[in-house]
Image (cartoon, coloured by chain):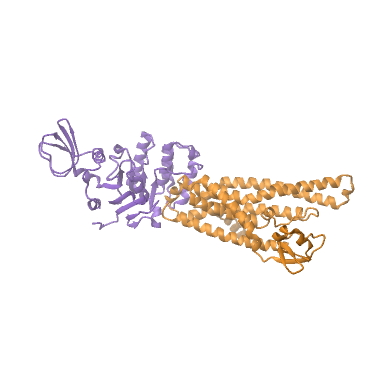
Chain colours: A purple, B orange
Amino acid sequence: MTEVTGPAPAVHAVGLGKSYRRGQWALRHCGFAVPAGRVCGVVGPNGAGKSTLFGLMAHLFAPSEGELRVFGEPAGTPALRARIGSVTQSRPLYPSFTVEETLRLGRELNPGWDEACAQRVIELGGLSPRARVGSLSGGQRSRVALALAMAKRPELLLLDEPMADLDPLARHDLMGLLLSDAAERATTVMISSHLLAELDGAIDHVLLVQSGRVRLAGDLDEILDGHRLVTGLADAPRPPGDAVEWRVTGRQVTGLLRTDSPVPDAWEPSRPQLEQLLLGYLRNPDAPVPSAPSTCEAAA
Amino acid sequence: MTTVELSRGSTAPSRLSVLRPRGPFWPAWRQSRPLRRVAVGVLLVAAVGLVTMNLLLLDADRGLAGSLCALPNHCADLNSRIFMLNTVFTNVVQPAMVALPVLVGMFVGAPLLAQEYERGTVQLIRAQSVSPARWLTARLVVPAVVVALSAGVLSALTTWVWRTGIAGHRFFLDSPFPGFTYHALDLAPLAWSLFGLALGTAVGVLLRRTIASILVSGVLLLLAELLMRFARPYFLPLVHGSAPNSRNHLGMFIQPSQSWLVNSGAVLADGTRLSEADCSRNYQACQDAPTVWGEYHPVSHFVPMQLVESGVLLVLTAALVVLVYRRVTRAVL
């Protein structure tokens, strides 16, 4: 059930739904929980509802149905404001402000501001403090937005594709800084990305959003352990377990199964990589999914 | 002595730092930089222009009153100077003061929050620890203070020029009531500018598009000024007057100097009251009527009338500000 014992999860959604227009649901029947201190990857195709989910968590808007709790409190509680940091996809900043002034804005509006952290993120990118935000490139703006969110020292950091327009080197450096920082302070991070490889090794929790539903949610190791990537001959009897994906190429078959029991000898099993698992689900939107309540259980 | 000096020395920096904008007032102060620059520029130009104008007017007045007028052509020069400056005041300064609240609404009020929504920076603010209500308070107070100070100084200047240099002149007696003059004097520029700011801001919050908000608030403010022109005479009870008709009157009521004649007409020998409209239809009847009547606001009504109007505008401004708060602080962005 949805009963949670122990410390409240950082994010806990029950039957969460959001519709912008009557009858059109951007997100519906979402149930999941992310324990505090985790780095949770939020993945899914474009328009799946990821940004809607981030908007709900940051309380840019209220849910149309269901319930969303952050650190045990309903999203939107004023006390949560200082505890959540967020970088939205459009990275709004004041174009007429300089980088320095943008950081000053963060300092003036946040009591827990960490100037050293902000400076580190800015200096890592070699940004001039006197440069106008409006004159920066997309990637540089992302860095300023990230500095603003990180230096606020939130307990929950919501990053909606924060690295999308950064070059690979900057992405690597910033990701390292972000992760070491989060580990040091036990910050919960929710991060979405299209670059599945980028998330591998960075996240320890995963949330797969597709067509406005949460298809998969839980501890990354548990999920990977619960799946088998099998290869074998097409005429061999199909192994037990729900097939997420079953691809026949000539006489060869590759399948992604949801099972943690051993597979028959005719099949060569392996533990899937994160990218393989996610692609398996993303390619097969109609594949069987653990039912909604069980995603909650698995997550909690 | 020493302790006094010491304590004064220690409080001085803290008194200064009180003035330095902090918290949500800092970004609001920073964002008001273009407005502050324009305001300082406008005030400098207006101050130099209006002071020079009035000094020239007063000098011409003194010249006309004094013996210099005996010199050939000198009076004509002085009179043409007065006439020219009066024309400038009527055709430039007064329309500018009528336009002031409209411009404030269009270019200060409308973009104030519309731009925040358009650029998505409200999301940036929502991601900070400050509450939306506190942020909004700072965002509104800073431009309101700049606008109020600027409108106050401009009004003080125009009122001074009008009262000492223009209305006091013996040849160019002007009433404070006609539309354009009314808007340039006393409380009107201040009350109207703050109302313009509030209206523009509210339109911006509702439309969330900068250009559309600028256009809509401009139209609405012009309409509001026009509507107020028709409502204004009824803020205070009109003074009723009647006088015997004579050849000089030609059937028209002559109101006391500088007052605002709102209604007039004639009373026939049989006691029938004719209105202005009746008189324009039947000119002869009014011209031959024994009595003429008029309803007017004497010049002593000017300040009370502006106070009532400012009160009405203040209530409207407060209602618009409440609307803005409700819109900005609600959960849905």
What residue lies at 39% left-to-right and 49% top-to-bottom? A85
Q: How many marks?
A: 0
Q: Quadrant of residue B244?
A: bottom right
Q: Is residue B328 left or right of residue B215?
A: left
Front one among A199 and A28: A28
The quarter in which the N terminus of chain B is drawn is bottom right
Relative vertical location of residue A292 with respect to residue B278 in this rendering, above or below? above
Specify the farthest residue to the bottom. Answer: B271
Q: Is residue A21 left or right of residue A243?
A: right
What residue lies at 81% left-to-right and 55% top-to-bottom? B170
Q: Is residue B253 left or right of residue A62?
A: right
Front one among A151 and B265: B265
Give the percent coordinates (x, y) of residue B12.
Answer: 59, 55
Give the percent coordinates (x, y) of residue B257.
Answer: 77, 60
Give the percent coordinates (x, y) of residue B109.
Answer: 55, 50
Q: Quadrant of residue A62?
A: bottom left
Give the percent coordinates (x, y) of residue A148.
Answer: 43, 45
Q: Is residue B295 visible?
A: no
Relative vertical location of residue B21 with respect to residue B262 in this rendering, above or below? above
Front one among B215 and B325: B215
Q: Is residue B120 visible?
A: yes
Relative vertical location of residue B169 with respect to residue A50 in this rendering, above or below? below
Q: Is residue A156 left or right of residue B140?
A: left
What residue lies at 67% left-to-right and 49% top-to-bottom? B95
